[in-house]
Image: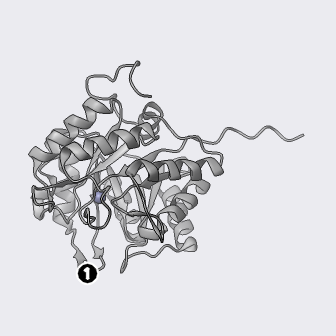
């Protein structure tokens, strides 16, 4: 007689609501103002997202790393989505040099951290070692958990080196990013090898996640759900449900990710479970138990 299967581990859904590139011309549902971003995040939270990955835009809709905008967005999300994990982007499209980390004193729960350089579709994604060291030190100083963006296998090894040097707390939370033109394609054997490398370096049970760009979004959701990872979706990475259909909202993409998780027997983690999985502190001010779960 075989033992009953252990219940599948809950699956965290991260919603990347805006990004640096998509515009309302690409999809009118892309939230650009802080008010739109808070509303879109709230819908995505209700649909099951427990992490929101945030960029901000200026009045002309261009990416910026303005800490004042980030502060307003973080405050709005914390008020309307109590408990949700706020992750701010330190990505390179929003600013240059240390301006990329100017929002870290806001002490968000998490921030993205690219630890190496690679090519993007039309340019070099520059992450020089001294800036990477500085961003990681700022995150440690302010109690911000980094999400390591692995655009390349070498970035996983760099994260291991940074853990060894005490620049990143163990275990690191790595996100595999595939489908960026001129970086890693969405390639299943390469994905499996990156997952195996994360587990070998950081432990078999370490949480990790994956993101696919454009038409690869659902594919990477599927691979990650099957392999025990966590999922990222949202209009930053992909504005369509399929070739012919624009995604009506970030929430619609979250619902799709939840369906993919369900196909693999994975329940969607609520924010309490997500905070426990990632080893995060309780939400600021302590979210009410009467609030959203
Ligand atoms: Zn981003």
Q: Nearer the viewer, residue 282 or 163?
A: 282
Residue at screen point 9% across, 44% down? 68
Residue at screen point 13% across, 46% down? 69
Ligand 1: image quarter: bottom left
Q: Is residue 272 above or below residue 125?
A: above
Question: Position of 100 compared to 274: left or right?
Answer: left
**What is the x, y in percent for residue 184?**
42, 75
Q: Is mark 1 within 8 Å of ligand 1?
A: no
The quarter in which the C terminus is drawn is top left
**What is the x, y in percent for residue 28?**
30, 59
Q: Nearer the viewer, residue 250 or 216?
A: 250
Label 1 neighbourhood size at 10 Å, few (<14), some (14-19), many (20+)?
few
**What is the x, y in percent for residue 87?**
29, 46
Q: Is residue 172 visible?
A: no
Q: Is residue 272 visible?
A: yes
At mark 1, the secondary structure is loop
Q: Nearer the viewer, residue 173 or 122?
A: 122
Residue at screen point 52% across, 73% down? 190
Q: Nearer the viewer, residue 167 or 113?
A: 113
The quarter in which the N terminus is drawn is top right
Q: Which residue is mark 1?
A: 122
Residue at screen point 67% across, 38% down? 7
């Amino acid at each position: 007689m075989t033992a009953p299967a252990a219940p599948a581990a809950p699956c965290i859904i991260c919603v990347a609501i805006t990004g640096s590139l998509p515009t309302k011309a690409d999809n009118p549902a892309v939230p650009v103002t802080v008010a739109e971003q808070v509303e879109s995040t709230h819908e995505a939270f209700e649909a099951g997202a427990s992490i929101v990955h945030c960029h901000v835009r200026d009045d002309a809709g261009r990416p910026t790393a303005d800490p004042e905008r980030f502060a307003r967005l973080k405050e709005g999300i914390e008020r309307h989505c109590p408990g949700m994990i706020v992750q701010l982007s330190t990505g390179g499209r929003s600013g240059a040099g240390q301006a990329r980390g100017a929002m870290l004193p806001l002490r968000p729960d998490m921030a993205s951290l690219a630890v190496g350089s690679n090519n993007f579709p039309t340019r070099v994604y520059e992450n020089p070692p001294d800036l990477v060291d500085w961003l990681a030190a700022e995150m440690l100083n302010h109690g911000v958990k980094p999400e390591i963006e692995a655009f390349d296998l070498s970035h996983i090894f760099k994260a291991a080196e940074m853990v060894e040097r005490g620049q990143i707390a163990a275990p690191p939370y790595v996100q595999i990013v595939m489908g960026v033109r001129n970086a890693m394609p969405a390639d299943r054997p390469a994905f499996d090898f990156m997952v195996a490398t994360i587990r070998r370096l950081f432990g078999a049970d370490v949480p990790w996640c994956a993101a696919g760009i454009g038409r690869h979004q659902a594919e990477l959701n599927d691979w990650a759900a099957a392999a025990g990872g966590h999922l990222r979706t949202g209009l930053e990475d992909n504005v369509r449900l399929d070739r012919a259909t624009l995604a009506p909202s970030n929430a619609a993409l979250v619902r799709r990710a939840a369906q993919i998780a369900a196909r693999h027997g994975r329940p969607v983690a609520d924010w309490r479970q997500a905070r426990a999985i990632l080893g995060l502190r309780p939400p600021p001010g302590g979210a009410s138990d009467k609030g959203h779960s």
